[in-house]
Amino acid sequence: MSRIKLALLSFAVALVVSGAAPAKGKASRSRCRHGGLSDSRGRHVRCLTRAEAQQLEDESAAPEPESGDDAQRKSLPVVEVRATFERGKTGVAKQRLSANANVFARCVADHGGLTKERGEVRIRFQVAKSGRAREVSVSKRRFVAPSAARCIAEAIDGTFVGVPSEQPTVGTAVLRLR
């Protein structure tokens, strides 16, 4: 017999002897009638009683209530972002600001929300040579709480909006919320 065949045969015998391989034709049986509990390492801790098993079955059959996170996500407003500049342009400003739309929506939801169905916030900022927004302020808000507008301004402060083609330049981010 070759060495490889001998090694494979001894490995298979070792598996069967250690009990790692299931016996052919026999279904593996649990040692507990109604199921059991195990610890984080998979070691058996104890068996469940009939009442515990029934309770777990009832809980798994009941529909799950919506978690608080799902309910909050549904109440977040939709944010549309537009960016304009007085001088020069940055080609990526709209994409960079739109990437933070969920942060802006969270600001509105956490700081008072919308007073009407639709709202608008205009944020003015200077664009540094590095392409980051600085000296950010709220220039206009409609149907949005003041603290929500300030939160949005703080979120835009320091955000990379792109290197402008002309220096210095002032930009305005227009956020439409619904």
Image (cartoon, rainbow, N blue to C red):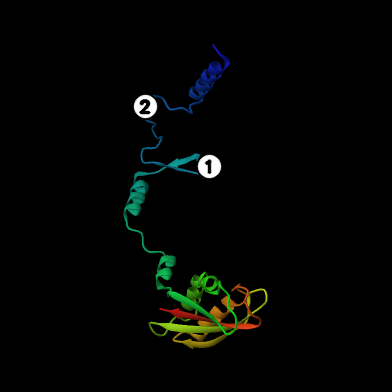
Q: Position of residue 113 (x, y in %)?
A: 45, 80
Q: Position of residue 79 (x, y in %)?
A: 45, 75
Asked whether the viewer can see residue 147, the reply is no
For image coordinates 46% across by 83% down, the residue present is 120
Q: Position of residue 85 (x, y in %)?
A: 56, 82
Label 1 close to label 2 by CB (< 8 Å): no
**Badge number at residue 28:** none
Q: Quarter of the image holding residue 28? A: top left
Within 10 Å of the Cα at label 1, are there few (<14), some (14-19), or many (20+) other Cα atoms?
Answer: few
> Is 115 situated above or below 75?
below
Within 10 Å of the Cα at label 2, are there few (<14), some (14-19), or many (20+) other Cα atoms?
Answer: few
Name which residue type carries label 2.
Lys
For image coordinates 53% across by 22% down, the residue present is 11
Screen quadrant of the C terminus: bottom left
For image coordinates 41% across by 25% down, the residue present is 23
Name which residue type carries label 1.
Arg
Between 93 and 143, the residue placed more toward the observer is 93
For image coordinates 32% across by 58% down, the residue present is 63
N-term-proximal mark, 1 vs 2: 2
Q: Which residue is mark 2?
A: 26
Between 83 and 102, the residue placed more toward the observer is 83
Question: Which residue reaches farthest top?
Answer: 1
Tell whether 105 sits left or right of 65. Answer: right
Screen quadrant of the N terminus: top right
Question: Which residue reaches farthest right?
Answer: 129
Between 76 and 52, the residue placed more toward the observer is 76
> Is 150 situated above or below 50?
below
Q: Which residue is mark 1?
A: 41
